[in-house]
Image (tube, rainbow, N blue to C red):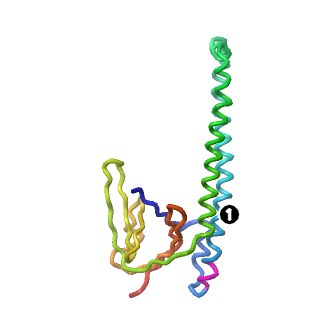
Amino acid sequence: TFPTTILLTAGTIQPILDLPFDRFTFWTSHLPILYHFDFRYSQSWNIRIAIGFMFLGLCIIFALYLQNEDTRAALFANPLNLLVFPAIIVIVGLILAFSIWLARRVSEMLKSADLKVAEGKIELDSHYNSGAGFTSYYVFVGKKRFGFTEDMSRTFKEGEKYRVYYVKASALELIMSYERVQA
């Protein structure tokens, strides 16, 4: 299976994660809402960029068709050629609409997700999938397993005890914060 854990350590979340532990209930109850708004903001920019590239590509294709007399004749020779451009717009629009729906669904799941804690000694493991051609890296915190696409041996030291705060939203497990626990 493909690893589904994401380690979030940068951006606007970092100052919130540095709050003292006695304010744990305050920031854990508001953290998913903060991510909810960040996803929506980045989603709107992604949509604008995707629509811009779509129209840029259509303009380039249309300009190539109108470049000389032979290509203009080929474009207007068959009415189905003129239907290709609106069909491309509809197909890309449907893909964007599906992406928006999926992103909002995951955002809503993250907004209502509970913060969970795993604590224990770290064990590192990896598995190479020759069929897919990639290596999956696993970090076991006690009995809880987190999967990664990158080696986490620089982040987590094997044999040491850690406390990991994470949220499970859909298939993703987002690690919000972690700390080394003195034995």
The relative height of residue 23 versus residue 48 in the rendered view (above or below) is below
Magenta span covers which residues?
23-27
Residue that badge 1 annotates: 37
Tag 1: amino acid = Phe
Question: Where residue 13 sits in the image (x, y, percent)?
Answer: 60, 70
Query: Which residue is at 62% across, 58% downward?
Result: 105
- Say few, some or many: other residues with alpha carbon within 10 Å of mark 1 (under 14 / 14 to 19 / 20 or more): few
Which SS type dominates the magenta stretch? helix
**Residue pictured at 60% horizontal, 77% vertical:** 28
Quarter occupied by residue 53: top right
- Measuring 38% from the left and 88% from the top, which residue is drawn there? 183
Give the structural element (helix, strand or loop) at label 1.
helix
Q: Quadrant of residue 64?
A: top right
Q: Is residue 1 magenta?
A: no
Q: Is residue 43 above or below residue 19?
A: above
Horizontal and vertical percent position of residue 24: 59, 83
5 relative to 131 in the view: left or right: right
Residue 172 lies, in percent from the top left, at 50, 62
Q: Compared with residue 23, is residue 48 higher up or lower down, i.e. above or below?
A: above
**Tag count:** 1
Task: Between residue 1 and residue 60, name the one nearer to us.
Answer: 1
Residue 55 position in % (x across, y down): 68, 35
x 66%, y 47%: residue: 47
Location of the N terminus (image quadrant): bottom left
Please give left or right for residue 167 compared with residue 101 in the image.
Answer: left
